């Protein structure tokens, strides 16, 4: 993987992809499977937002992505649509969770969890919440149910991993949602420790409303040759 020296060193897909996707337009043009398209329809989305149009194809290709766009621009679906496409259906025999979504707050995690339920209505994926403030025992038993997806706050997730000696070698896809807030909330150390426990072969995506230097450094260390997609600046 490439060591980035500056945020300008991120590969920018700008000119390559955007004009083509603008023309082809909808979710149908993204090559999504029927269960995913039906979930999108169920949720009531007709056309992708600009950040969805830019990020979904790149994440589907398997690239690590750092995406920056303002609050309300539709970032949740940017990482959930590829998640559903990648995980497809439930795998009870898998050795552990295949996807992990880290959120800065309980409220956001719960919202994301509900979002998966709705968008993933035509998938039978098992999704659990691991949140600070909930009982550890209920989280141990939730993990024992072999979830495909874990939505968690970072401190409790790491605590549960350590208590259960949970191996994260099964994680294929990890999302840092609202990454700027994850750091503002003081989760930096837990995020670095979580990254250390993940397998090299995973896909990592990071979504944020802002991109402070701290996040650029984190992305350099934890992501592999990431594509930067930012809709905040005119280029
Ligand atoms: P962000 O994470 O960027 O703040 P959200 O993912 O929370 O944004 O989405 C903001 C709102 O826009 C939500 O109510 C969501 O359901 C809605 N939304 C997202 N994508 C679309 C779309 N393609 N069409 C219509 N509404 C959308
Ligand atoms: Mg969001």
Image: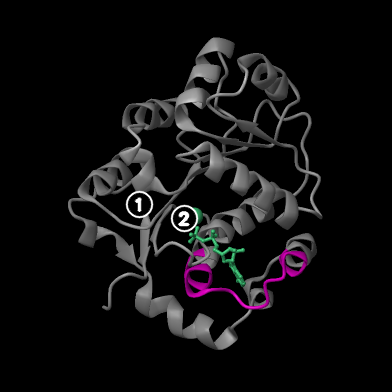
**Which mark is first along the chain, 2 or 1?**
2
- Rendered residue at 81%/55% (across/down): 122
Is the Cβ of the residue at disc 1 closer than 8 Å to that at disc 2?
Answer: yes
Q: Circle 1 sits in a helix, a strand or a loop, which is it?
A: loop
Judging by the rendered image, the residue that carries numbered circle 1 is: 225
Q: Residue 29 versus residue 232: which sits nearer the camera?
A: 232
- Rendered residue at 55%/24% (across/down): 133
Taking the image as four quarters, which one is ligand 1 found in?
bottom right
Give residue 28's position: percent from left, percent from top: 69, 76
The reply to whether residue 152 is in sight is yes
Judging by the rendered image, the residue that carries numbered circle 2 is: 63
Task: Check the image and name the residue furthest to the bottom.
Answer: 23
Looking at the image, residue 68 lies above or below residue 64:
below
Give residue 139's position: percent from left, percent from top: 65, 21
Compared across the picture, whether 163 is left or right of 121 comes to left
Give residue 154's position: percent from left, percent from top: 46, 31
Q: Residues within 10 Å of mark 1 (few under 14, many from 20)?
A: some
Give residue 69's position: percent from left, percent from top: 40, 64
Can residue 53 be found in the magenta stretch? yes
The reply to whether residue 173 is in sight is no
- Rendered residue at 47%/69% (across/down): 51
- Rendered residue at 29%/46% (across/down): 215
Q: Report the span colored magenta.
A: 40-55
**Residue 182 occupies quadrant:** top left
**Residue 99 occupies quadrant:** top right
Looking at the image, residue 198 lies above or below residue 53:
above
Structure colour scheme: one colour
Q: Residue 36 versus residue 103: which sits nearer the camera?
A: 103
Compared across the picture, whether 207 is left or right of 123 comes to left
Question: What is the spatial separation of the Cα atoms under label 1 and label 2, in whole angstroms?
Answer: 8 Å
Q: Which mark is residue 77?
A: none
């Amino acid at each position: 993987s490439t060591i980035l020296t500056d945020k300008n060193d991120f590969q920018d897909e700008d000119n390559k992809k955007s004009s083509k996707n603008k023309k082809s337009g909808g979710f149908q043009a993204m090559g999504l499977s029927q269960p995913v398209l039906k979930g999108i329809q169920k949720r009531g989305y007709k056309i992708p937002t600009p950040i969805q149009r830019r990020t979904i194809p790149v994440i589907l290709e398997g690239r690590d992505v750092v995406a920056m766009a303002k609050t309300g621009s539709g970032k949740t679906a940017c990482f959930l649509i590829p998640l559903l496409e990648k995980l497809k259906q439930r795998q009870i025999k898998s050795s552990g969770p295949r996807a992990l979504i880290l959120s800065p707050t309980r409220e956001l995690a719960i919202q994301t969890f509900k979002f998966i339920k709705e968008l993933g209505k035509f998938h039978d994926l098992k999704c659990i919440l691991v949140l600070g403030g909930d009982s550890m025992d209920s989280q141990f038993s939730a993990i024992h149910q072999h979830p495909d997806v874990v939505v968690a706050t970072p401190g409790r997730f790491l605590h549960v991993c350590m208590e259960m000696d949970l191996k994260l070698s099964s994680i294929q896809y990890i999302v840092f949602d609202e990454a700027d807030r994850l750091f503002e909330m003081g989760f930096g150390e837990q995020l670095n420790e979580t990254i250390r426990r993940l397998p090299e072969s995973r896909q990592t995506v990071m979504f944020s409303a802002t991109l402070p230097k701290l996040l650029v450094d984190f992305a350099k260390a934890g992501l592999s040759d990431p594509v930067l997609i930012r809709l905040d600046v005119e280029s």
